[in-house]
Image (cartoon, helix red, strand yellow):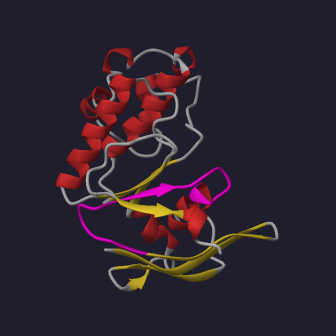
Amino acid sequence: MLEAQNLAAIRGERLVFANVSFLLRAGEALLLVGPNGAGKSSLIRLLAGLTPPAAGALLWNGEDALDDPPLHATRLAFVGHMDAIKPGLTVADNLGLTRKVARSEIVAALATVDLDRFADLPARLLSSGQRRRLALSRLALSDAPLWLLDEPTTGLDAASVRRLEGNFAAHRARGGMIIAATHLPLDLPDAKPLDLSRTIS
């Protein structure tokens, strides 16, 4: 269970958002909405432990989630704006960078985004949409219960978005949680909406 209690973030000298509170249980999803500059990316980075909150608390099963950053990192899979693809490596080798993974697992992860046939292709030859799909394929290799996604559908065609939504549904069915920031419609049934443009009066 992830709980935010009156979180606030400051960027530069500007208050980006304040008094953000929510409770997310196993199998649930939270959809962050609001215009550019409302703080969606800032909140995602805060939840990932990449930036500290200016105020408030983030709890994991009732304990301070940010008290042990290495432990918190094991709880989540984060896909941000940057795809973090090394163009000099093959598509498959990009998935084996952070830990030892069997070739069969890598190919299976690539299949979740329809890139398995490109496993041995240099990543520099991928289109922008394929690079995004490669970044998203890392989710399939993670056992983390919490997925944090910043504009996950950027650059994806309609078929890829539907495939991604299927992956979301499977993760939630296993008890996983999803927090996604998006400007575009995303099929996350029963997702709790959080409009960050309304957090500062």
Please give the name of the residue rendered at 56% of the width and 77% of the height, measured from the top-left corner.
Answer: 7
Give how far across and how far down residue 75 sits, in percent: 37, 64
- Height in image: 105 above or below 14? above
Q: Residue at x 28, y 70 (%)?
A: 25
Furthest toward the left, the residue is: 173
Dividing the picture into quadrants, the one containing residue 147 is: bottom left
Q: Is residue 32 magenta?
A: yes
Question: Which portion, as a residue range, is magenta?
Answer: 22-40
Q: Classify the position of the C terminus by image quarter.
A: bottom right
* Quadrant the N terminus occupies: bottom left
Drawn side of residue 78 relative to residue 25, left or right = right
Where is residue 111 shown, x and y percent of the image?
28, 26
- Residue 11 location (% of width, % of height): 74, 66
Does the magenta portion include 44?
A: no
Which residue, as the protein is rendered here, is positioned at the far right? 13
* Location of residue 110 by image quarter: top left
Position of 52 relative to 42 (above/below): below
Horizontal placement of 139 versus 82: left or right? left
Q: Is residue 25 above or below residue 101?
A: below
Q: Nearer the viewer, residue 69 or 76?
A: 76
Q: Is residue 186 above or below residue 130?
A: below
Q: Residue at (40%, 59%) from the top-left corner?
A: 76
Which residue appears farthest toward the front when viewing the image? Answer: 201
Residue 84 pos. (x, y %):
57, 38
